[in-house]
Image (cartoon, rainbow, N blue to C red):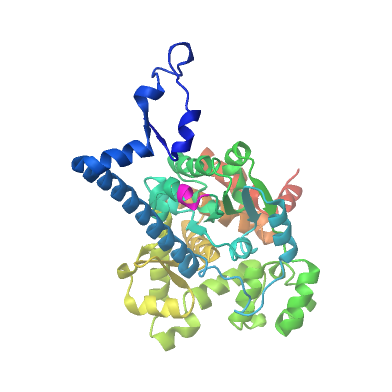
């Protein structure tokens, strides 16, 4: 059946039967063509047909309205919650100038883009800057692809219907923190791949993702299949740092002390130092600084009297949020599973955020890394050299523990004494299983200090 929009087109229609038939169904203008005039004529004289036609058109109209409504809801959530939760400012006021990179990305106008960099480099903030002036942006954390059973469940709307409805208007799908699903099941990768396949069919549709450089290997096949263009955020340059030092004298003092050079390469660390008004005398190397963040910031040690929440209570709540979310590869944990006083305190101190209407998670992914580091340090120390006990314990967390273990190992390379004793012992010990040796080696290779480790152990 063919509907001709205008009756003027009728003379252009040809028969497709006999030798000219296409496929298994023949078509003749006389028998099979239905024009708009035919429909109007029958509707004028056949009330049953008119009712049926009305019901069909109403159904299509309702579906259209539903798609529009759900799209508007998804866009509103993106702007009011998703993008809003991404912190792009130091101390809520200073923005690092990434305009040169943003301009290049926009001028390149690649259909599929991924922003890479190390933890705390500002990947999500850069993505937010790229899409902030776009009218139609659908944002999702990568964990959404684990929670959803189909592609429409991620944004709660029919993606294909939305793309048809937009009729050429630009839309950007922003998927944040791909590293979170780097070690999830293949079926979830397939869902992400399906999004790329759908978007490939629409010139007006784009996909923007962020991912830690250390986890990019998990997405190499996807990058190759869809010609995804990668852009890397480097550590803060000296020129960028000079501007920050002009604004914040504490960073100037740290820079002059030289021993904090690694900390001052990261926008995340600088924001922690400035916004939390940290005493730099309490900050040693990067490893001790992360322990400081765990104890005094995340677990509210310095605010426990204000909120009447003990360090232990805060630590237990944080650990539950992080571990439950990681084990299930979920967007968050139900708010009502955590003591309401603790939730209120953690939200007030910008430690956790709402994820949707009912769930909560830690605001920064690095906070979660630090939580796992604290747990792994504790379990490792308690095993007292009985490595099998250590690995048996952490394996109970399930598949999610591998990536966190790799991060833990990578960060152990911060300190030379760890490289000399701790890691060498794990790599060369005969008491460790092949799988955990492999995970240790992956963590070392992912570390930005891996060259130092191999240099120290080249003999």
Q: Quadrant of the C terminus?
A: top right
Most extreme residue toward the top, as rendered? 19
Q: Is residue 388 magenta?
A: no
* Residue numbers of the magenta segment: 163-167
Instruction: Decide: is 289 above or below 323.
Output: below
Q: Residue at x 29, y 48 (%)?
A: 59
Residue at (43, 71) in percent of width and height: 315
Q: How many marks?
A: 0
Residue 165 falls inside the magenta stretch: yes
Q: Is residue 94 above or below residue 216?
A: below
Specify the principal SS of the magenta part: helix
Which picture quadrant has residue 335? bottom left
Depth check, front residue: 43 or 429 = 43
Q: Where residue 411 sits in the image (x, y, percent)?
A: 62, 59
Residue at 50%, 84% (x, y): give it. Answer: 302
| Residue 380 x/y as whole percent | 50, 57
Q: Would you say residue 433 is visible in this rendering?
A: no
């Amino acid at each position: 059946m063919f509907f001709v929009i205008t009756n003027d087109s009728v003379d252009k229609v040809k028969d497709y039967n006999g030798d000219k038939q296409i496929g298994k169904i023949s078509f003749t203008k006389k028998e099979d063509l239905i024009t708009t005039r035919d429909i109007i004529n029958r509707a004028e004289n056949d009330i049953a047909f008119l009712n049926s036609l009305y019901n069909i058109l109403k159904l299509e109209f309702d579906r259209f309205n539903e798609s529009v409504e759900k799209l508007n809801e998804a866009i509103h959530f993106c702007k009011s919650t998703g993008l809003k939760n991404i912190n792009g400012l130091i101390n809520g006021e200073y923005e690092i100038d990434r305009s040169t990179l943003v301009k290049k990305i926009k001028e390149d106008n690649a259909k599929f883009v991924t922003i890479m960099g190390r933890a705390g480099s500002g990947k999500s903030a850069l993505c937010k800057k790229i899409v902030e002036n776009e009218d139609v942006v659908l944002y999702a954390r990568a964990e959404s692809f684990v929670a959803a059973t189909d592609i429409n469940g991620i944004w709660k709307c029919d993606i294909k219907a939305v793309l048809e409805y937009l009729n050429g208007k630009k839309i950007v799908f922003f998927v944040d923190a791909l590293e979170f699903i780097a070690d999830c099941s293949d079926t979830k990768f397939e869902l992400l791949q399906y999004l790329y396949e759908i978007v490939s069919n629409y010139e007006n549709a784009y996909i923007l993702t962020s991912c830690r450089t250390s986890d990019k290997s998990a997405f190499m096949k996807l990058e190759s299949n869809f010609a995804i263009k990668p852009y890397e955020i480097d550590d803060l340059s000296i020129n960028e740092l000079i501007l920050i030092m002009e604004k914040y004298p504490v960073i100037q003092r740290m820079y002059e002390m030289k021993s904090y050079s690694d900390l001052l390469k990261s926008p995340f660390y600088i924001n922690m130092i400035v916004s939390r008004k940290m005493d730099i005398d309490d900050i040693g190397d990067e490893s001790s600084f992360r322990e400081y963040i765990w104890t005094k910031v995340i677990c509210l040690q310095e605010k426990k009297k204000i909120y009447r929440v003990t360090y232990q209570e805060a630590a237990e709540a944080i650990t539950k949020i992080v571990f439950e979310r990681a084990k299930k590869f979920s967007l968050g944990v139900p708010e009502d599973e955590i003591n309401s006083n603790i939730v209120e305190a953690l939200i007030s101190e910008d430690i956790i955020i709402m994820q949707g209407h009912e769930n909560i998670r830690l605001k920064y992914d690095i906070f979660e890394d630090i939580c796992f580091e604290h747990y792994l340090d504790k379990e490792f120390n308690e095993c007292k050299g009985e490595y099998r006990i250590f690995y048996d314990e952490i394996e109970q967390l399930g598949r999610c523990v591998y990536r966190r273990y790799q991060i833990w190992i990578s960060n152990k390379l911060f300190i030379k004494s760890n490289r000399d004793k701790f890691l060498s012992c794990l790599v060369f010990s005969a008491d460790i299983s092949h799988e955990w040796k492999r995970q240790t080696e992956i963590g070392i290779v992912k570390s930005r200090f891996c060259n130092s480790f191999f240099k120290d152990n080249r003999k």
